[in-house]
Image (tube, coloured by chain):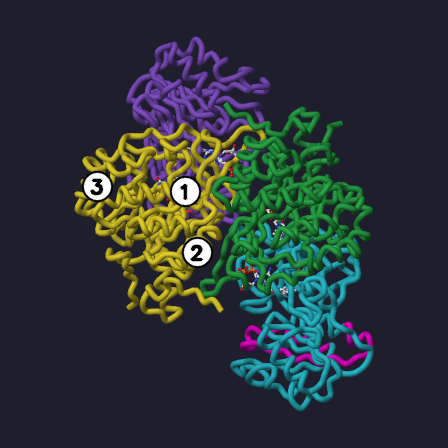
Chain colours: A yellow, B green, C purple, D cyan
Amino acid sequence: MVNLAVDINGYSLKNPVMTASGTFGFGEEYEDFINIDDLGGIVVKGTTLHHREGNAYPRMAETPAGMLNAVGLQNKGVDYFINNIYPRIKHYNTGIFVNVSGSAIEDYVETAEKLNDLENIPGIELNISCPNVKEGGMSFGVHCPSAVAVTEAVRKVYKKHLMVKLSPNVTDVTEIAKGVEGAGADSVSLINTLLGMAINAEKRRPELSTITGGLSGPCIKPVALRMVWQVYNAVKVPIIGMGGIMNATDAIEFMLAGATAIQVGTANFIDPTITVKIVDGIKDYMNRHSITDVNNLIGGMIVD
Amino acid sequence: MVNLAVDINGYSLKNPVMTASGTFGFGEEYEDFINIDDLGGIVVKGTTLHHREGNAYPRMAETPAGMLNAVGLQNKGVDYFINNIYPRIKHYNTGIFVNVSGSAIEDYVETAEKLNDLENIPGIELNISCPNVKEGGMSFGVHCPSAVAVTEAVRKVYKKHLMVKLSPNVTDVTEIAKGVEGAGADSVSLINTLLGMAINAEKRRPELSTITGGLSGPCIKPVALRMVWQVYNAVKVPIIGMGGIMNATDAIEFMLAGATAIQVGTANFIDPTITVKIVDGIKDYMNRHSITDVNNLIGGMIVD
Amino acid sequence: MKKKVEVFTVTKNRRINQEYLILHVASETSLPEILPGQFVEIKVENGPNTFLRRPISIHEVDNDKNEILLLIQEVGEGTRLMAELKPGDKLDMIYPLGNQFSIPNKGNVLLVGGGVGVAPLLMLGRFLKANGATPHFLLGARSENILMDLTDYKKIGDVGVTTEDGSLGVKGFVTDHPLMKEGLANMDLVCTCGPDPMMRAVAAAAKSANIKCEVSLENMMACGFGACLCCVVDTKEGNKCTCTEGPVFDINELKGW
Amino acid sequence: MKKKVEVFTVTKNRRINQEYLILHVASETSLPEILPGQFVEIKVENGPNTFLRRPISIHEVDNDKNEILLLIQEVGEGTRLMAELKPGDKLDMIYPLGNQFSIPNKGNVLLVGGGVGVAPLLMLGRFLKANGATPHFLLGARSENILMDLTDYKKIGDVGVTTEDGSLGVKGFVTDHPLMKEGLANMDLVCTCGPDPMMRAVAAAAKSANIKCEVSLENMMACGFGACLCCVVDTKEGNKCTCTEGPVFDINELKGW
Ligand SMILES: Cc1cc2nc3c(=O)[nH]c(=O)nc-3n(C[C@H](O)[C@H](O)[C@H](O)COP(=O)(O)OP(=O)(O)OC[C@H]3O[C@@H](n4cnc5c(N)ncnc54)[C@H](O)[C@@H]3O)c2cc1C
Ligand SMILES: Cc1cc2nc3c(=O)[nH]c(=O)nc-3n(C[C@H](O)[C@H](O)[C@H](O)COP(=O)(O)OP(=O)(O)OC[C@H]3O[C@@H](n4cnc5c(N)ncnc54)[C@H](O)[C@@H]3O)c2cc1C
Ligand SMILES: Cc1cc2nc3c(=O)[nH]c(=O)nc-3n(C[C@H](O)[C@H](O)[C@H](O)COP(=O)(O)O)c2cc1C
Ligand SMILES: Cc1cc2nc3c(=O)[nH]c(=O)nc-3n(C[C@H](O)[C@H](O)[C@H](O)COP(=O)(O)O)c2cc1C
Ligand code: FES
Ligand code: FES
């Protein structure tokens, strides 16, 4: 018997495998394929204070070993989540995290406050990759002061686990990681999508309605692993690693680089059963390497 | 007959297809496969003031749709280039650019100065992705002040075409592009490699001796295209686009996004004849689309 | 109808013409209920450029053999690799996905297919006929040599044909066919699937003739089962997912149709 | 010797054992001069995870048939896809790459191969014999059932064998074989190819016996023809490219050997 449970700053996950926001709906979309309770945790779709229609179609393009998306946070707003969705999913015996997004600090704060009282929501993931409408549209997450400001403001009102999700579109991810740690984040998750673009040469047009979009999938794994390792060497809070995880080996690489838990995103689209396979694969690896506690993998990369 | 010639701020390339530094040796390595004179230009290996041994083996790892490298600017120094290599390659009837690297501004300046007098070298490409040893090792290219400083210093001594190669590992590539344009760059080339990392899960070790390395190949194409398009909308100097170009369609996408010329890097390893195929493929595309002048592709993406 | 991921076995790969083929894939167990208009998401193995699954309509179902038939047009790497499959090869599919066309129990239904868009219509015709309605097929193609084999369609209903080069049937587009002109008034429902401009022309004709019209959309999909929100279409009630709330929509629901 | 990119046709795929196979690939034109120790870089088609080419030694050359023979061990996706190739399939290769082993015209030469490292030694033996030297093979494997077919080797020289489980020949590693112990003093040259620890052990033995020793290195390569500088080995004259200045090196050139 191996121990798969990990602790993220006081909250225990039964195993390190979570799902990434925006790729797993509210869990319900996957009920036909897997038992949600087998997962360490799920992060539900990006939720904003008010209803958002998202961006115009087309919203996705396939790229080498990945995809671009421009969904644009389509969601029915936090009240709808609380009243209509939460009652349907609160029975899941797994850590249900809500991904909170916004375009102004007050939006984040108000949304987070409303989620305080949901008993079976142990924490929120603050998506600071959204455009900061008050400061010219650059995302909160790419500048340290705005990342710190939004984290601090939410920290003041939100009582439970506060995970802050970092943007990879920055010069120095460690600066921002340290900033949000100082501002009260209980953990950091990374990476969100890389900003990318695709063009249809025949049509001479962009593939996405928004021209640029978020790149995800195995193509970004080397960048994601690098950032997890850099952040691991910079902060003390636990790291939830993601970016292109397609199988158990990838998941283990993130843990070796310093992640306490991992999130699976785009891979769910290709194999909706992949998360439970990853849990099993981690067990196999541990047995093969005579590792009895998954916590021994965290930051376990050997550097001479 | 179609016109393939493009002008990069006064210097004319017979076609927009160049090769990327560090992937094409000094051209000689490809003489068995293609006629170098068929190319618009070549950028030779990263050259520094003094001889450099580069990093320890292992220096490369395969990644999804790409590779990481950590060559570390192995080269025999600029004097060796001038005395031993230049005489062997100066007969090429193509634009031969020297990629200049350094760890201190004075190194860049001295190296560039020495290259001034080589008749058949129309320009240099300033690789500002190298670590700035005097300022803590962060690369010159990731902060605007250091990028500007090195460009200005080299501009003062270098008389011919000054191309500055931008790093993608930044929050805002347009800021740096504008900075180096203001500092006297005749053109900007982008992107250099994305900083990445790979881990061997079985060995629990990094794949590269340097732990992190530079990611290249099709996996980075969406990021590269996005940056070319952003820079195209920010500066007036010509852009030389690169990052994952594997075929003529990719090359055309970069031109549609705003590149005047393109560089082919990693693809040369997989098909050493790919550059001339790309030249032919661009011609085919132009014929198919009744485009008589390749310049009409530049920035030709249709945005409603 | 629970969705599943299942590895099917190819039992037959029948070439229809230069561009089209029909793939028969068999399950080891009996198939769940599958309705006309639904589709599968196929994992293309060994495709360096086929990262995502490919959505393909369910062309027909053979419940005796536990087989699903897929009508595939070769347009890129994914469909080309599907075209190379041989009996015995495996095919990983998520199914059954999406909603279905309406199946009234009486009246005349015009089924208009363009190109590979005919894929779901054969099965739809069979269901309509079994339920008491009268299906009329109208199939359009660029040329006779890339038209479907019509034998199976003729067993179910009458078949009108248009080809752009006039090599068979009426020369022109489906909207040039008498079934879409004089004939339209006799129809109680029009169901269409094919290239966007064709469906829009058919929808416009049906709308002005005041006849209910259902279209099957082929939006770009990343997942196929409602998780990614990439495949949306703008409807009067806001964005809807083509993969779960479609692919079949009544044109009255859609904005801009 | 000009390097070329050429698409060969597979003519034969012979399975040697569970892990090894020999692929015969034919050119349409006559082959250029190919020397023992040289290698090819293979583009693996349809491999989602085989972005770069794969370096494989030239096992033998059949100039009458314009064929190159490759001895391949299945270790990952690329070599697995090579193992699946059938006669008639195409194989895109860059060749001939790298330098060669020394070929003296007299004296005793010990050729020590471990695992798939035996690949270049058969051809080397043939060249040595033709040139007047006497080749002696020493082949090591984990077990008899993954050892090479020895027939062709025996035609050229005497063959010593070690297996780790003792199922054939001497039990143990190649360095446990009499040829590497008492026998070594009679040798004028040792050429070795195989896993790094094996080559280091062989090199150490040769060095202490004061016998010239050449090793063939299998460094990771991105290009194979000197363009990327990824494949370097630390030598007394600084970093050298394994792909152009190797793969064969005299151990006296190398640092740390
Ligand atoms: C609900 C639905 C049902 C379909 N039914 C059929 C069918 O029965 N038979 C059939 O041959 N085709 C069908 N298609 C279209 C089919 O999905 C595409 O032709 C296929 O995905 C192209 O893949 P490829 O790798 O061959 O081409 P690619 O090289 O990837 O692309 C070629 C073209 O296909 C389009 N395309 C690529 N990926 C997708 C995607 N994920 N979704 C939609 N379009 C895409 C691209 O815009 C491009 O123009 C259907 C599509 C949808 C959404
Ligand atoms: C000069 C040279 C000659 C070789 N000759 C032969 C031969 O005759 N027969 C044979 O079977 N093998 C030979 N090899 C080894 C062969 O190149 C690798 O086994 C092969 O590249 C693995 O590819 P894969 O996709 O099957 O495995 P992967 O899944 O890519 O990797 C499996 C293992 O192979 C190693 N490997 C992967 N890519 C390379 C690479 N580009 N260069 C070196 N090692 C790599 C990795 O470290 C890994 O441990 C030779 C290697 C070199 C450098
Ligand atoms: C279709 C799609 C929608 C996404 N939506 C969100 C979102 O709403 N909030 C968020 O923080 N991240 C979102 N992401 C980013 C993922 O959660 C994840 O950070 C990223 O995709 C990298 O992981 P992957 O490569 O495993 O997919 C989305 C990603 C995709 C592909
Ligand atoms: C092996 C290797 C070595 C490189 N060396 C250099 C270099 O010396 N100087 C430089 O500016 N860029 C160097 N690069 C970066 C390339 O020139 C190019 O910017 C990058 O690889 C992206 O293009 P690609 O995806 O087409 O390869 C190197 C890239 C590779 C793969
Ligand atoms: S394709 Fe993912 S929601 Fe429809
Ligand atoms: S593999 Fe590229 S230089 Fe040797």
Q: Nearer the viewer, residue B289 or D239?
A: D239
Please tell me in which quadrant of the rendered image residue B162 appears. top right
Which portion, as a residue range, is magenta?
Answer: D127-155
Q: Residue furthest top?
A: C182
Q: Residue type at mark 3?
A: Leu
Q: Residue furthest bottom?
A: D182
Q: Is residue D148 magenta?
A: yes
Residue at (41%, 17%) from the top-left corner?
C203
Vertical side of A240 occupied by D109: above or below? below
For mark 1, give the secondary structure: loop
Residue at (41%, 30%) from the top-left corner?
C120
Q: Which residue is mark 3?
A: A115
Tags 2 and 1 on a common chain: yes
* Cα distance between the residues tagged 2 and 1: 17 Å
- Quarter of the image containing the C terminus of chain C? top left
Q: Nearer the viewer, residue B11 or A192?
A: B11
Rendering coords of residue D51 (x, y %)? 57, 52
Q: Residue type at mark 2?
A: Gln
**Sequence-wise, which precedes: disc 2 or disc 3?**
3
Vertical side of D94 occupied by D136: above or below? below
Please tell me in which quadrant of the rendered image residue D161 appears. bottom right
In the drawing, does residue D10 fall left or right of residue A252? right
Rendering coords of residue C104 (x, y %)? 30, 22
Observer-side mark, 2 or 1, equals 1
Report whether residue A246 is seen: yes
